[in-house]
């Protein structure tokens, strides 16, 4: 049995630009055609813009977005909470999430079992040094052979990305953002092994030295990419130019509510941090957004739409560039651009309708009026 229907919208953004079309025909969960004129029986969504479902390049379904996300890992019902978290993303119009740190490969399992949620890409437990950043997720590995083995295990378990903690992070006691955890040889071994398995690899890196290691090892993307030092931020134009030239994505930790107050360590560095993000964009670094949803109360699951206005404010992007970042560019960075991030025939019918025109008001992304995932209509969160 086939199911076919057509959606009409005032405007259509195809992942790249507004196109002269009025309707999208959907058949069996995929886009069958983009139509200049809507047929009479089309489902008319009115004065909205239809765009590809958003893609969050960095979430943690296992973290509960509460005051003690690490402690909550050990409480009963983790898998059920992860399912709820995934559904919250979908209800916000985020039709694909990439989980960059679960425990026991639960996000991989959820990806296979959840039929009514978003598409879930998963790295499994992030690869980290013994007692390194996020070691409690279970991904400790060291030495060139140990790191290679860790990548092979993830590939065998069905991970769709590899995540390596190149520098430390503030969430873990004894770990520091401005210091590298791994050697150049270990970082390179991880990248080579990931690529040998056809998997993209992304590096958690705050410090410039860690960003440099990721670039030298040919990582596909860099999470956070803050250029943090012990006392400040040191934007490095040479590294940014290398990222731009080699097409290495910066997955910026965007997605915060208006009026958000960052933690003190970030607050005192904020002006310089925005200088860095503006310079990255001006240098041509491909920028996508990963919300890091789950890591605390300011990071609820489904926060990504706020990355639209954040990218505009933080990097100097135009709204259309921000829309590309959250759709087609994000799909490319996750290597799913043959199915996602674009409204075109054969692509998955993952769609989002927002009121008015997001090219003139990017905040409309946060108020979706209709959501479809593989052609199935989803009720937006109130
Ligand atoms: Zn994270």
Image (tube, grey):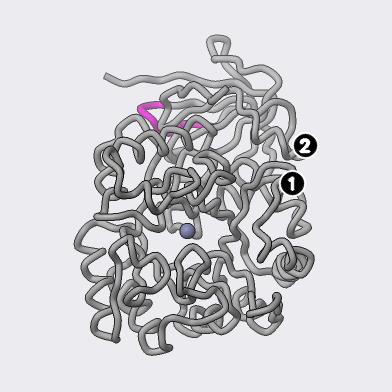
User: CA gap, disc 2 to disc 1?
Assistant: 8 Å
Q: Is residue 376 or residue 171 the one in the foreground?
A: 171
Image height of 103 relative to 54, above or below:
below
Callout 1: SS? helix
- For residue 1: magenta? no
Q: Quadrant of the C terminus?
A: top right
Residue 245 is situated, as x and y percent measured from the top left of the image, at 62, 77
Q: Is residue 213 or residue 68 the one in the foreground?
A: 68
The residue sitting at 29% across, 86% down in the picture is 144
Majority secondary structure of magenta residues = strand
Residue 125 is situated, as x and y percent measured from the top left of the image, at 32, 61
Q: Residues within 10 Å of mark 1 (few under 14, many from 20)?
A: many
Residue 65 is situated, as x and y percent measured from the top left of the image, at 48, 44
Q: Is residue 311 or residue 335 the one in the foreground?
A: 311
Q: Quadrant of the N terminus?
A: top left
Q: Which residue is mark 2?
A: 361
Can residue 58 be spotted in the picture?
A: yes
Residue 40 is situated, as x and y percent measured from the top left of the image, at 57, 10
Which quadrant of the view contains residue 150?
A: bottom left
Q: Which of the two labelled residues, at mark 2 and mark 1, occupies the earlier sequence position? A: 1
Q: Is residue 114 or residue 45 the one in the foreground?
A: 114
Q: Which residues are magenta?
A: 27-33
Image height of 246 relative to 265, above or below:
below
* Residue lying furthest top: 41
- The answer to whether mark 2 and mark 1 are in CB contact below 8 A is yes
Tell whether circle 1 marks a residue whose Cβ is less than 8 angstroms from ligand 1.
Answer: no
Q: Which residue is mark 1?
A: 319
């Amino acid at each position: 049995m086939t199911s076919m229907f057509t959606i009409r919208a005032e405007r259509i953004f195809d992942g790249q630009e507004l196109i002269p079309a009025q309707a999208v025909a959907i058949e069996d969960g995929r886009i069958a055609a983009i139509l200049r004129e809507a047929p009479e029986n089309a489902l008319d969504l009115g004065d909205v813009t239809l765009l590809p479902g958003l893609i969050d390049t960095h979430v943690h379904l296992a973290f509960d977005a509460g005051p003690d996300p690490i402690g909550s890992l050990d409480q009963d019902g983790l898998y059920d909470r992860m399912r709820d978290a995934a559904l919250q993303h979908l209800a916000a119009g985020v039709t694909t999430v990439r989980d960059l740190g679960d425990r026991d490969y639960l996000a991989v399992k959820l990806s296979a079992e959840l039929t009514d949620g978003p598409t879930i890409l998963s790295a499994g437990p992030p690869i980290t040094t013994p007692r390194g950043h996020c070691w409690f997720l279970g991904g400790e590995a060291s030495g060139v052979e140990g790191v290679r083995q860790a990548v092979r295990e993830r590939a065998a378990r069905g991970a769709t990305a590899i995540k390596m903690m190149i520098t430390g992070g503030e969430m873990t006691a004894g770990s520091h953002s401005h210091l590298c955890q791994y050697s150049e040889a270990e970082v390179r071994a991880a990248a080579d092994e990931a690529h040998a398995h056809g998997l993209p690899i992304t590096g958690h890196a705050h410090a410039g030295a860690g960003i440099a290691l990721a670039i030298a090892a040919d990582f596909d993307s860099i999470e956070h990419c803050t250029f943090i030092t012990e006392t400040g931020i040191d934007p490095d134009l040479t590294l940014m130019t290398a990222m731009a030239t080699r097409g290495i994505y910066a997955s910026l930790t965007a997605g915060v509510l208006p009026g958000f107050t960052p933690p003190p360590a970030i607050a005192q560095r904020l002006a310089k941090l925005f200088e860095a993000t503006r310079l990255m964009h001006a240098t041509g670094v491909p920028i996508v957004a990963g919300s890091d949803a789950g890591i605390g109360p300011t990071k609820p699951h489904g926060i990504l739409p706020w990355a639209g206005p954040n990218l505009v404010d933080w990097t100097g992007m135009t709204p259309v560039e921000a829309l590309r970042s959250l759709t087609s560019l994000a799909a490319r960075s996750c290597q799913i651009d043959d199915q996602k991030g674009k409204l075109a025939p054969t692509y998955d019918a993952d769609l989002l309708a927002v009121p008015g025109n997001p090219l003139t008001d990017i905040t409309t992304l946060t108020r979706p009026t209709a959501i479809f995932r593989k052609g199935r209509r989803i009720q937006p969160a109130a």
